[in-house]
Image (spheres, rainbow, N blue to C red):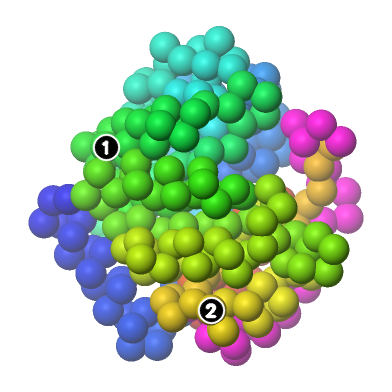
């Protein structure tokens, strides 16, 4: 982590510790889809970093214009294992490098050197060809180290939905030397708030208590589930809490976003105000959240 990156990150953490709320960006993948970028099967929209770089950069720029202080690279599904399932693992370095460079270009174009770039990494995969835990840790390490080399300020682990895979991603990403934030996706199962894989959220929080994780984000989670997740975090988590929920639905095979009847920017802001009043310090949005939502949130933070 170079001196500039470290200073930028430490400045932001200091503000959070002093009680400030930090605005992050909204969706990138679903925004690419909404703007007509064709998907590469099994990789969502990570291919856009090479196929439609102007679209990706513009999305980042729009979020910066709305006041976002952290933008997440368009790398949600560009891990080695995810690209392998699409037959394009050979593009791993090119896709990851291009995505980080596009985020940096957006920051430079908007003259906002204070904006942090978070390298997005997940274990999520659309096929049954899941990597072993050892491979997942190595893949996370490879991607995080590459992101650090290209200038990311932190690693943003996303859509963590199984505790063992969560830990593998954390351990792999830590090798980059960058701060690691963990984002879990949650839904109720038999009346208990659980990771999407079925394990109670409480158990996941216990599993990472000894890891160096300063912030837990509840992300890619239904708006209606967030308050109950905050109840759990308030009792079982001593670190900073962030939220970036999703506002759209998905096709049955989870390969396409459905943009009909998404939550409006105004209603998302009403819910976000409630979360901020409960102590959430990092706020933004996931799938379906676009620039209008983030601009509305800017008025809150």
Q: Is residue 138 above or below residue 229?
A: above
Judging depth in this view, the residue of 67 and 172 nearest the camera is 172
Q: Nearer the viewer, mark 1 or mark 2?
A: 2
Where does the magenta region start and end?
252-281
Q: Residues within 10 Å of mark 1 (few under 14, many from 20)?
A: many
Q: Which residue is found at the position 63% from the left and 78% from the top? A: 232
Q: Is residue 190 above or below residue 153?
A: below
Percent x, y for residue 117? 35, 51
Numbered mark located on residue 75 in the image: none
Q: Helix or strand or loop: what does disc 1 sit on?
A: helix
Percent x, y for residue 81? 50, 24
Percent x, y for residue 84? 52, 16
Badge count? 2
Q: Is residue 143 above or below residue 148?
A: above
Quadrant of res 147: top left
**Mark 1 / mark 2, whichever is N-terminal:** 1
Judging depth in this view, the residue of 59 and 70 nearest the camera is 70
Tell me the CA gap for discs 1 and 2.
31 Å
In the image, is 56 to the left or to the right of 91? right
Mark 2 lies on residue:
236
Residue 49 visible in rendering? no
Q: Are marks 1 and 2 in contact (CB under 8 Å)?
A: no
Q: Residues within 10 Å of mark 2 (few under 14, many from 20)?
A: some
In the image, is 178 to the left or to the right of 102? left
Q: Which residue is found at the position 39% from the left and 45% from the top? A: 119
Mark 1 lies on residue:
145
Q: Which residue is found at the position 82% from the left and 48% from the top? A: 249
Q: Helix or strand or loop: what does disc 2 sit on?
A: helix
Residue 198 visible in rendering? yes
Percent x, y for residue 110? 36, 53
Q: Which residue is found at the position 59% from the left and 17% from the top? A: 85
Quadrant of res 38: top right
């Amino acid at each position: 982590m170079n001196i500039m990156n470290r200073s930028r990150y430490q400045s932001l953490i200091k503000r959070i510790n002093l009680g400030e709320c930090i605005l992050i960006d909204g969706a990138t993948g679903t925004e690419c889809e909404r703007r007509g970028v064709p998907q590469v099967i099994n990789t969502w929209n990570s291919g856009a970093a090479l196929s439609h770089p102007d679209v990706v950069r513009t999305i980042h720029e729009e979020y910066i214009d709305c006041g976002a202080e952290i933008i997440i690279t368009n790398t949600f599904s560009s891990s080695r294992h995810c690209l392998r399932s699409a037959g394009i693992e050979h593009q791993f370095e090119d896709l990851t490098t291009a995505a980080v460079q596009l985020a940096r270009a957006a920051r430079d174009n908007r003259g906002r050197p204070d904006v942090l770039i978070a390298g997005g990494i997940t274990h999520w995969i659309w096929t049954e060809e899941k990597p072993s835990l050892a491979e997942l840790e190595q893949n996370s390490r490879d991607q995080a180290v590459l992101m650090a080399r290209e200038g990311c300020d932190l690693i943003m682990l996303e859509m963590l939905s199984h505790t063992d895979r969560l830990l593998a991603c954390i351990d792999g990403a830590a090798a980059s030397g960058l701060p690691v934030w963990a984002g879990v996706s949650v839904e109720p199962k038999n009346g208990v708030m659980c990771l999407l894989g079925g394990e109670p959220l409480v158990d996941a929080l216990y599993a990472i208590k000894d890891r160096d994780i300063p912030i837990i984000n509840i992300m890619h989670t239904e708006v209606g589930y967030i308050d109950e997740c905050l109840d759990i975090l308030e009792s079982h988590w001593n670190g900073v809490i962030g939220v970036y929920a999703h506002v759209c639905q998905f096709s049955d095979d989870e390969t396409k976003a459905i943009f009909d009847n998404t939550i409006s920017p105004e209603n998302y802001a009403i819910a976000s105000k409630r979360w901020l009043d409960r102590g959430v310090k990092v706020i933004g949005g996931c799938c379906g959240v676009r620039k209008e939502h983030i601009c509305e949130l800017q008025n809150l933070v």
